[in-house]
Amino acid sequence: MATQLQTEQGIVRVPSGTWRVDPSHSSVSFEVRHMMIATVRGRFREFEGTLVAAEDLAESRVSGRAIVASIDTGQTDRDAHLRSPDFFDAEAFPEMSFRSMRIEHVEGGMFRVIGELTIKDQTPELSLATVVHGAGADPWGNERVGLGAHAVINRTDFGLAWQQRLARGGVLVGDEVTIVLDVSAVRVHD
């Protein structure tokens, strides 16, 4: 039986229930400017998340975490530097986490998920622009929902302040980081 997206007064929303992020069909990635001329993209290979969708949007919530040591930009030396105390300090702070405080409907299937993102020991508020892509049954009988989310943060707000000035002017690593989430979640049956 396919799960249909709930629609109510033009709102496309995740069907009520508890949903677990399927890491094999999801991604937690980021983009940051390098030398002010290129973009480095990376991702976290180990992560988990839960969505609890309630009839009353005010009772819905989202949470998740990523293992810092699983960072992967495709370049071994850069990944080791990102795990070091210069950046994430994976040994002292092995995971980063997000917990929603509220979810606001924007229009149609678009929402704003406002919550606390904790990286290292910093927990500023974050607003994720989120869209519900769809819902349905997969070939193995699981009920799934798909979502996408993104936000732009200033990495220095999270204590990720390492920097190197370039001889021609400018800096090696941009301060703005775009976070991109692509989520496929499976309904949890109690």
Image (cartoon, rainbow, N blue to C red):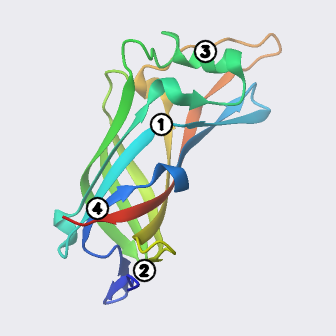
Q: Amino acid at mark 3?
A: Ala
- Mark 1 and mark 2: Cα distance apart in space: 31 Å
On the image, the x and y values in percent for residue 41 come to: 67, 38
Q: Mark 1 or mark 2: which is in front?
A: 1
Q: Mark 1 or mark 3: which is in front?
A: 1
Q: Is residue 11 visible?
A: yes
**Residue on which the image places disc 4:** 103
Give me the disc on residue 46: 1
> Quarter of the image holding residue 106?
bottom left
Give whichever of discs 1 and 3 has the lower sequence position.
Answer: 1
**Residue on which the image places disc 3:** 80
Q: Secondary structure at mark 3?
A: helix
- Mark 4 and mark 2: Cα distance apart in space: 14 Å
Q: Quadrant of the N terminus?
A: bottom left
Asked whether, in this view, residue 160 is left or right of residue 80, the answer is left
Give me the disc on residue 108: 2
Give whichever of discs 3 and 2 has the lower sequence position.
Answer: 3
In the image, residue 103 sits, relative to residue 16, either above or below, namely above
Q: Amino acid at mark 4?
A: Ile
Decide: few, some or many residues near mark 4? Use Cα within 10 Å; few <14, some 14-19, many ≥20: many
On the image, the x and y values in percent for residue 190 come to: 18, 64
